[in-house]
């Protein structure tokens, strides 16, 4: 999915294996990034992603589901875990790679993962209300966030401490 235009997603897209979103994504839809049976699934976002998008990850300890964001400053979608009913552990794990970001700590408050360098906010990742952050790593190319019920899939780099910071106010469009 590349080109000079944009992808307007007002439905549910299911992503398996390797997928690159080379254009901006807007609309009010859901993108499901679900592991395939035979290989890891990676969805890479090279352009902006609007507030109206909901990106759901579903992986496990054998095959991960990863979202790579090349420009975190333009990624406004809500991230979360893809859950199935009845609730099982088979899809409740995902990795988020935020390229180019550098942080020294993080905090999770009110459906937001706040990344800090010292006391300065470097990025805020919007999370679905049911998404648990397992751990956050600073790697060579950026930040790696493990979400879901497990911290398996730990990354190389420096494990960031979760530090309580004063509440950061940010605006969520309606």
Image (cartoon, grey):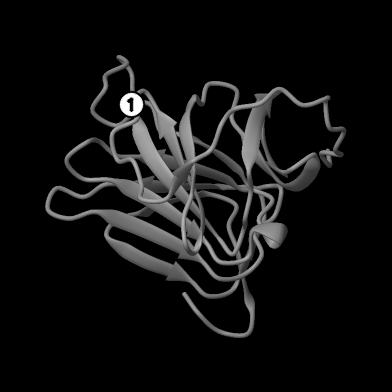
Q: Classify mark 1: residues with Cα within 10 Å, few (<14), some (14-19) or many (20+).
A: some
Image quadrant in which you'd find residue 116: top right
Is 109 placed above or below 16 here?
above
- Image coordinates of residue 137 in percent, x first then y, are 48, 44
**Residue at the image point whose x is 33% and y is 47% from the top:** 65
**Residue at the image point whose x is 53% and y is 21% from the top:** 130
- Image coordinates of residue 162 in percent, x first then y, are 59, 27
Q: Is residue 94 left or right of residue 110?
A: left
- Image coordinates of residue 91 in percent, x first then y, are 29, 32
**Residue at the image point whose x is 53% and y is 49% from the top:** 11
- Image coordinates of residue 147 in percent, x first then y, are 44, 33
Is 107 placed above or below 100 here?
above
**Residue at the image point whose x is 66% and y is 29% from the top:** 107
Q: Secondary structure at mark 1?
A: loop
- Farthest left residue? 38
Q: In the rendered picture of this protein, how many numbered marks are placed on residues?
A: 1
Q: Is residue 55 left or right of residue 73?
A: left
Q: Nearer the viewer, residue 48 or 148?
A: 148
Q: Nearer the viewer, residue 174 or 144?
A: 144
Q: Does residue 111 show up? A: no
Is 75 placed above or below 35 here?
below
The C terminus sits in image quarter:
top right
Q: Does residue 172 show up? A: yes
Which residue corresponds to mark 1? 150
- Farthest top residue? 86
Q: Nearer the viewer, residue 83 or 116?
A: 116
Q: Nearer the viewer, residue 34 or 141?
A: 141
């Amino acid at each position: 999915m590349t080109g000079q235009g944009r992808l307007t997603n007002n439905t549910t897209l299911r992503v398996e294996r390797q997928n690159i979103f080379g254009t901006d994504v807007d609309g009010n839809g859901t993108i499901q990034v679900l592991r395939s049976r035979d290989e890891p699934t990676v969805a890479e976002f090279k352009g902006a992603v609007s507030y109206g998008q909901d990106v759901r990850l579903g992986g496990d300890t054998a095959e991960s589901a990863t979202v790579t964001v090349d420009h975190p400053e333009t990624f406004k979608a809500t991230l979360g875990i893809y859950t199935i009913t009845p609730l099982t552990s088979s899809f409740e794990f995902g990795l988020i790679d935020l390229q180019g970001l550098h942080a020294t700590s993080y905090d999770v408050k009110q459906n937001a993962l706040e990344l800090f360098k010292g006391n300065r906010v470097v990025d805020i990742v919007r999370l679905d209300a049911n998404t648990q952050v397992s751990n956050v790593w600073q790697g060579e190319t950026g930040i790696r966030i493990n979400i879901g019920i497990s911290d398996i899939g730990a990354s190389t780099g420096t494990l960031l401490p979760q530090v309580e910071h004063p509440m950061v106010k940010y605006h969520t469009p309606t």
